[in-house]
Image (cartoon, helix red, strand yellow):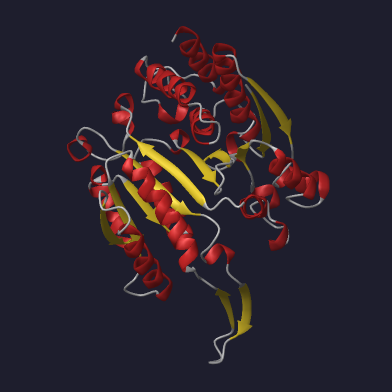
Amino acid sequence: MDFNIAVVKGDGIGPEIVDEAIKVLNCVGEKFGHTFNYKEVLAGGCSIDVNGVPLTQETIDICKNADSVLLGAVGGPKWDNVDSTLRPEKALLGLRSELGLFANIRPAMMYEALADACPIKKEIIGDGFDLVVCRELTGDVYFGKHYRKESENGYGIMGCDDMNYSTYEVERIARRAFEMARVRSKKVTSVDKANVLETSRVWRETVTKVAKDYPDVELDYMYVDNAAMQLVRNPGQFDVIVTGNLFGDILSDEASMITGSIGMLPSASLNEGGRGMYEPIHGSAPDIAGKNIANPIATILSAAMMLKYSFNLTDEANVIEKAVNDVLNDGCRTADIALKGEDVLSTSQMGDKICEKIKLG
């Protein structure tokens, strides 16, 4: 089978880690008889340098016409002082909006081989954890109106950001969460701030209504501050966390760190038709860009999510996931997940090791 993938390598370590994901995809293609065709496009800071804007219509069109999008990372201090409307991160928001990517799926699990890298005590994590943050991606304060005005009390300029959700937006992300829970451990935790925010009260009411269609799935609620605490107190209590854009952004980063490294966490951003954009949740890490030391595993696992969610190639995705687990069990480590005294692999060496496991598996 042939699949067309739009590739946005982006900025910083983006090109290095995406190259390793492509290497792994090609290895899977050879093993299973698939052909992956890649079309590289610019977005983020590199697009600002070439085109003057973080996202062009050409990039949007190519991404829309592709079967899926593989993305590295965007941004960096080089573009910190550009106009706010031209920041590299605008490319991500633009792609999410143009492609209708409303559901951000971010799994976080504890690999047994990396238990010592986890900042949480072993007696707390126990047998580990395996959770998913299901984050609504096209609403909330990130897509609300942003403006400034003079305060009426003489305190100076006020910055204003509108936070809002419609019942439609909440219902579709809630259904995605419940459907995921059905094939996992059948538990959904809805995270909001309903004791303070009207947006969250609409959120909770809507999730409660949707839950009636899924009587086989347990539903509980947490305020976001408590959820942040519970993630480090007892991460094993969670199965699927469903929450809004702002809270999901924060909680998924927290979830990544309790796995031992943000370099381990992939993500999928999906539209209603199943097409998606796949990317690691970490940033562009410009301080280590070009040094061949970044951890490519999050990007490689993002490619595995692409195979599973957009291409329905579950066996192929499982092969990648098993290969990652196997190399970790063999003691293969990049700098971010290595303990003192352990040998460290480069970015490309880690990609090679994973490919070796795929060929042998």
Taking 278 as reference, is 334 left or right? left
Residue nearest the observer in this picture, 235 or 309: 309
At a point 61% along the width and 72% down the height, the residue shown is 145
Residue nearest the viewer, comparing 124 with 25: 25
Q: In this view, which residue lies farthest toward the bottom? A: 153
Q: For the point 58% across and 69% down, which residue is it?
A: 144
Give the percent coordinates (x, y) of residue 279: 55, 39
User: In this figure, what is the number of numbered marks?
Assistant: 0
Instruction: Indicate the quadrant where residue 9 lies.
Output: top right
Where is residue 174? Give x, y as percent: 40, 56
Q: Residue at 57% across / 15% down in the picture? A: 27
User: Which percent across, then down, holds residue 357?
Assistant: 46, 12
Q: Quadrant of residue 200?
A: bottom left
Establish if 354 lies above or below 304: above
Look at the image and tell me in which quarter the C terminus lies: top left
In the image, 139: left or right of 53? left
Residue 131's x, y, as percent? 33, 42
